[in-house]
Image (spheres, rainbow, N blue to C red):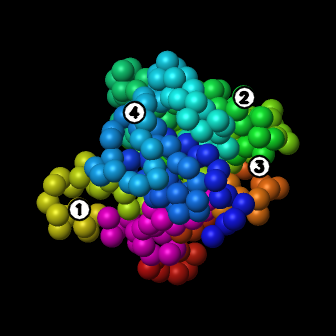
Amino acid sequence: MYDCLRSKIVIVTGGSQGIGEAIADAFHKEGCSVYNFDVRKPEEDRAGICYIECDVSSETNVSASIAEVVKRSGRIDIVVNNAGIEKYNAAGEVPSEEWDEIIGVNLKGSFLMSKYAIPHLLRTKEGVILYTASVQSSMVQKRDAAYVTSKHALLGLARSVAIDYAPYIRSVAICPGTILTPLQLWCARQEVGNDPEKVERKLAQWGRLCPMERQGKPEEVANVAVFMATSYASYVTGTCIYIDGGLSSFIPESAPGQEKV
């Protein structure tokens, strides 16, 4: 338990499932008041986590939702920009409306949340903004152009906020790798269809690509997000933290003269 987080006011976007749900739950366990901004209502109400319907790509929605949090709680201490979507297409094949949708949620949504939260975070003089980027902020998967572009850009946004608003706001990007979430299940089904055995094999295959030889858990990302928001990470800003089982450091090739494993 981090006593320094007790009673903090936290907003998590995309907190109804997957990594966002785990992050919201983790902050709540630390004694924080947590607001979940999402277009999708959680499947069940979670005590201590207040759901506010919000499309983060809409400036009107974001402005009104942040104002509602301040009205209820009086301030904002921590913002976790986690909401994100992914659809597969190469750059030459992405429909313009699909590009706009992905960039709108993943990048513009994080910008709008930051824009409207920053004045409130400055008042605390120790505000924190976290951005859920991706291992694909530095690596590229085939046929994923819009998503990859949005996640690369999030690193620039996180660093810009860190430089522009230091020392009163810390800004950090967390970069998950292959994490077992509903989005990951959807991605697997896009490749192999809905057969449960094929999906399971695909998920296991992706896990074996990591040196840790497994997929990560949402809770493992949430643990890092919570720590980054504590006073124990008070000198960490303008950087990215990879939570990827070593994937971003691994070249999946054997050395010369050795057989591939």
Q: Which residue is mark 3?
A: 237
Gap between marks 2 and 1 measured at Cα:
45 Å
Label 1 residue SS: helix
Amino acid type, mark 1: Val
Amino acid type, mark 4: Glu
**Residues tagged 2 and 3 counted as in contact (Cβ below 8 A):** no
Measuring 52% from the left and 66% from the top, which residue is drawn there?
220
Q: Which comes before the other along the chain, label 4 or label 1? A: 4
Please state which of residues 43 and 109 is positioned toward the viewer in this rendering: 43
Q: Nearer the viewer, mark 3 or mark 4?
A: 4
Q: Which comes before the other along the chain, label 2 or label 3? A: 2
Residue occupying the far right of the picture: 167
Q: Which residue is mark 4?
A: 53
**Residues tagged 2 and 1 counted as in contact (Cβ below 8 A):** no
Q: Quadrant of the N terminus?
A: bottom right
Q: Quick check: can you spot residue 162?
A: no
Disc 2 packing (10 Å; few <14; some 14–19; many ≥20): few
Say how many tags the image has.
4
In the displayed structure, 258 sits above or below 84; it is below
Q: Which residue is mark 2?
A: 119
Q: Residue 199, which numbered label?
A: 1
Amino acid type, mark 3: Thr
